[in-house]
Image (cartoon, rainbow, N blue to C red):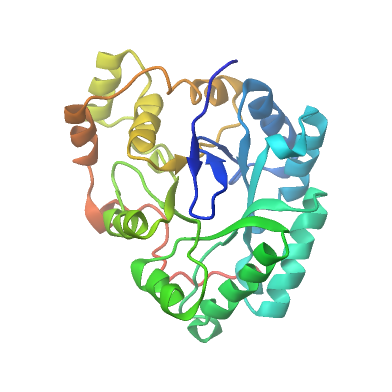
Amino acid sequence: MTTRIPDITLNDGNTIPQLGFGVFQIEPKDTVRAVRTALDLGYRHIDTAQMYGNEAEVGQAVRESGLDRRDVYITSKLNNGFHRPDDARKAFESTLSALKMDYIDLFLIHWPLPTLYDGDFVSTWKTLEEFRHDGRARSIGVSNFQVAHLERLAVQTDTVPAVNQIEVHPYFGNEEVREYGRANGIATEAWSPIAQGKVLDDPTLVEIAEQTGRTVAQVVLRWHVQRGDIVFPKSITPERIEENLGIFDFELDDATMERITGLGRGEAGRQGPNPDTFDYVPS
């Protein structure tokens, strides 16, 4: 596989591969094999999280791949139970320990949790700034932050998040948050890029896939990439993992892009929790 995955330059000067491999809901027992398959095929960006429970297996897969650590981009995210600064510091240490790495490329606050911790995600963000300053996190960012949350960080802290990882797919464009990111130099990462599979039978997308000679998943991932977002589809099926790489040798024209964007359903299209009210903390 010789697919050339484009890089995006973040606001801190670091670069990130625009297409990555996600390990959300991949069982630890399946993670090493799936990540090894992705790395063997040419992926160089792996997205995990403390709450996924598979950081150690991601680290193992990278070591077994024989690739230089510097050639693999690793993201992880802070567990919702560890927002208080001292807890966040210990949790970050545990991530590095699980990965068996001395730095991580990108570390995110997984959810803002505005109804918990007295709504104080600002002190959590300031703790992540420490990790960036000491070099153990090359870049720092957030996930599932709404515009109001980002505006608070802009007023009360010194560092603009490098990325905001949010739910984005054809049924839920999340345009207000994406536009704030564009205006303020925050790259958008799209999670649930195919709406947990719900868009795969959409008649409009099926028609576009037939016209382009691609799968629906490839068409949707191509839509994400042409919009400038970072995307990391998840699969444990080698054929699907390889298929998802095949999005850089075709383009969607403007009219097709608009048709796909036009499938948006506003808030009704959201598949995951609303960040303004989400308050899950693992027991």
Q: Looking at the image, how many numbered discs can be counted on the residues?
A: 0
Quadrant (top left, top right, bottom left, bottom right) of the N terminus: top right
Percent across and percent down for residue 15 are 55, 43
Answer yes or no: is residue 73 visible: yes
Of all residues, the one furthest to the front in this rendering is 13
Q: Is residue 243 left or right of residue 263?
A: right
Residue 23's place in the image compared with 271, above or below, is above
Residue shown at the point (55%, 62%) measured from the top left: 110
Q: Quick one: 154 or 197, which is closer to the camera?
A: 154
Q: Quadrant of residue 238?
A: top right
Percent across and percent down for residue 222 are 37, 29
Residue shown at the point (47%, 80%) measured from the top left: 156
Q: Quadrant of residue 129?
A: bottom right
Q: Quadrant of residue 12?
A: bottom right
Residue 85's place in the image compared with 47, above or below, is below
Percent across and percent down for residue 201 are 31, 30
Q: Quick one: 204 or 225, which is closer to the camera?
A: 225
Of all residues, the one furthest to the bottom in this rendering is 118
Percent across and percent down for residue 105 are 65, 50
Residue 108's place in the image compared with 203, above or below, is below
Residue 130's place in the image compared with 264, above or below, is below
Answer yes or no: is residue 276 visible: no
Quadrant (top left, top right, bottom left, bottom right) of the C terminus: bottom right
Q: Quick one: 277 or 64, which is closer to the camera?
A: 64
